[in-house]
Image (cartoon, rainbow, N blue to C red):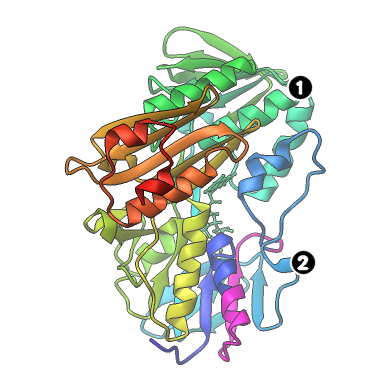
Amino acid sequence: MKTDGPIVIIGAGEAGATLAADLARRGNSLPIHLVGAEDCAPYERPPLSKAHLEPDEIARVVPLFAGGDIPDAIIHHRGVHALRIDRAARTVELSDGQRLDYGRLVLATGAASRRLPIAEGIVGIHYLRNLREAQALRPLLLAGGPIAILGAGFIGLEVAAAARKHGTAVSVIEPQARILARGVSASIAGKVQELHERNGVAFRLGTSVSTIDRSGDTIALILSDGGTIAATTIVIGIGAVPEVALAREAGLMVDNGITVDARLQTSDPAILAIGDCCAFPLSIYGGRRVRLESWRNARDQAAMAAALLSGEAIGEMPLPWFWSDQYDHGLQVAGLIDEGGTEILRRPNEDVLMSFHLAADGRLVAAQGFGPGQAVARDIRLAEMLIGRGARPDPAFLADPSVKLKSLL
Ligand SMILES: Cc1cc2nc3c(=O)[nH]c(=O)nc-3n(C[C@H](O)[C@H](O)[C@H](O)COP(=O)(O)OP(=O)(O)OC[C@H]3O[C@@H](n4cnc5c(N)ncnc54)[C@H](O)[C@@H]3O)c2cc1C
């Protein structure tokens, strides 16, 4: 699939900027336009809820382009929104008045924080999706809080860990009965919760916020179980919604993300979609459609798009993989845990827990691990290989830490 006109990429985040860099590196001869709404050079998002918020770190930004320099081959439209796509004319209208022609268009618009309606307009309420929001949050953690975090997902828990490193008092409020209810098993989530509790985080699970009131410097949260919490800063981490407005307006198929096929093609063959904004089929799970909010997925799909736009063959969509760092611990998840009916636990030592998920036919379909530093990284890599090969390992071997996973390959 060779392109025959400029390549326009909308969204200069992980997926869009990685794709542009890859195309430039390949010596692509067509103009590459990278349109980004944020008024800064493209940067890595994962550190925003980790190193960026920590006390001993200069609030540094990790650039997406090596050395922070954007290659000459890329025309970066910085601080500019793509407003409209005209599919018949193959043009994109920008907020600065320009109109770009495209041969191929790539949507890499990412996702936006899910908003909590009762919190709108209240001073002291924060979300965390971009650099500007991280820069606003950091001094508030240094100021000492107390802070309340709504939502016990990855972002909320990473902010909680960073806040505790500042010594800031933290409460986490979650309507579900447990933390990390989406995408992580109860066993692993239990270990994560223990670590947070050891570090002084107070959890209020199975309750939601019914009223938010600000008076002076204090924000009072009234909970559905009748409890109250007072804080100076509220961080809301209740998930993200894919940025699909442009695609929808242009008449592209959208269903929990911009619908693409295994070649990342939308319902218009001239338009691809990659990263957090797209929903794609995973052949390893029988073509099940998923939308992932994951750094590696954004980069993998950027690499696939670069190959496709250069007329090269591509392989299968890679296995989902996600990591999170909290305190000095790392959590990794490979595969989709809800594909497996049976969970097998392995405890290499008191600090480390691995969990394997087997489908009804015995196939390993997902693995998770939680432990200090990089303790689980190697086993997760091996588990990814087992999943990729459709292995049916003996559950007794999976549970036994003395059996090396490598020997099951
Ligand atoms: C705080 C934080 C921490 C994270 N930590 C982890 C982690 O530990 N592990 C992990 O696996 N993943 C993590 N992620 C997820 C990971 O960063 C995302 O999956 C990844 O950034 C997705 O890349 P993307 O390019 O699809 O979207 P994004 O990186 O969100 O980029 C989309 C860009 O498109 C721009 N845009 C949208 N609409 C328009 C428009 N109309 N015109 C112009 N520009 C537009 C947006 O402004 C944005 O800059 C984290 C995310 C956040 C926010």
Judge left or right: residue 112 versus residue 167: left
Task: State which region is magenta.
Answer: 21-41
Q: Which mark is residue 67?
A: 2
- How far apart marks 2 and 1 lie (CA) works out to 34 Å
N-terminal of the two: label 2 or label 1?
2
Which label number is shown at residue 144?
Answer: 1
Label 1: few (<14), some (14–19) or many (≥20) C-alpha neighbours in 10 Å: some
Q: Quadrant of ligand 1?
A: bottom right
Q: Are marks 2 and 1 in contact (CB under 8 Å)?
A: no
Q: Is residue 33 inside the magenta stretch?
A: yes
Q: Quadrant of residue 213?
A: top right
Judge by depth and name the residue closer to the eye, 128 or 182. Answer: 182
Horizontal relation, residue 287 to residue 138: left or right: left
x 43%, y 48%: residue: 406
**Residue 158, how many percent across, how many down?**
60, 34
Q: Is residue 167 above or below residue 90?
A: above
Residue situated in front as seen by the camera: 171 or 198: 198
Query: Mark 1 belongs to which amino acid?
Result: Gly
Q: Evaluate whether residue 179 shows in this view.
A: no
Relative depth, front residue between 374 and 398? 398
